[in-house]
Amino acid sequence: MPSFATSSEVRDNTNGVQLVLRARHLLVSGHPSHTVYTLKGRLPDEVDVILESDLVVSLTGIVNRVKIDSRDIQRSAIAGHLLSYFHANSEQLGVRPASKIYVDESDGVAKLTLSPTRPLLKPRSPASTTRLCAIELLYVFRTVPLEAAQPRKPYTRS
């Protein structure tokens, strides 16, 4: 199997704001291919996923269906929080503290880079080894109009 991707999504809704975080993991097994196949469901437990080289994490965002400029994402509190998380947990994750968030001039996307700190372990089976190459994070925010967010009075007509 050449290049493929898996996706996951986490949602939260509080005080009239809905946040959806979509994560797409790009992986390669064997040699990379031009086509990236989408894997439905989870990776099988017997597949070893390794980080062989620098990992690029892309950050994009949408607020109320409007794409956010990459420079705004670069300066955002969410990007700062993610960077702080990687700095605080880098040892447990097996990576060096993350690079600063930068805007890649080739595609205009905000990114950060993580580098592995641990030597490569021998995989259980070379045939079942998969390399993690990139992670794409998409933050989607939706806000509820103020009048819709307020509770209705139970005895009034609307």
Image: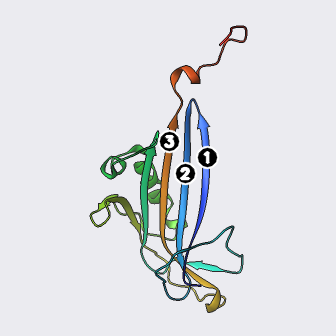
Q: Secondary structure at mark 1?
A: strand
148, 51: nearer the viewer = 148
- Which amino acid does the dot numbered 1 rest on? Arg
Instruction: Measure the alpha-carbon separation of dots 1 and 2.
Output: 6 Å
Q: Determine whether 58 is above or below 94 in the image.
A: above
Q: Are marks 1 and 2 in contact (CB under 8 Å)?
A: yes
Would you name the residue on which mark 1 appears?
Answer: 11
Q: Determine whether 21 is above or below 154 in the image.
A: below
Would you name the residue on which mark 2 appears?
Answer: 21
Q: Earlier in the sequence, mark 3 or mark 1?
A: 1
Which residue: 63% across, 80% down? 48
Residue 4, located in which quarter of the rendered image?
Answer: bottom right
- Residue 49 image offset from top left, x and y in percent: 59, 77
Q: Secondary structure at mark 2?
A: strand
Could you tell whether 102 is left or right of 143 in the image?
Answer: left
In the rendered image, which quarter contains the N terminus? bottom right
Which residue: 49% across, 66% down? 135
Tally the numbered discs.
3
- Residue 59 image offset from top left, x and y in percent: 42, 56
Q: Determine whether 147 is above or below 28 in the image.
A: above
Q: Secondary structure at mark 3?
A: strand
Could you tell whether 47 is left or right of 111 in the image?
Answer: right
Q: Earlier in the sequence, mark 3 or mark 2?
A: 2
Q: Earlier in the sequence, mark 1 or mark 2?
A: 1
Which residue: 61% across, 42% down? 12
Would you name the residue on which mark 3 appears?
Answer: 141
152, 117: nearer the viewer = 152
* Protein image colouring: rainbow
- Which amino acid does the dot numbered 3 rest on? Phe
Instruction: Measure the alpha-carbon separation of dots 3 and 1.
Output: 10 Å
- Residue 10 image offset from top left, x and y in percent: 61, 51
- Residue 14 image offset from top left, x and y in percent: 59, 34
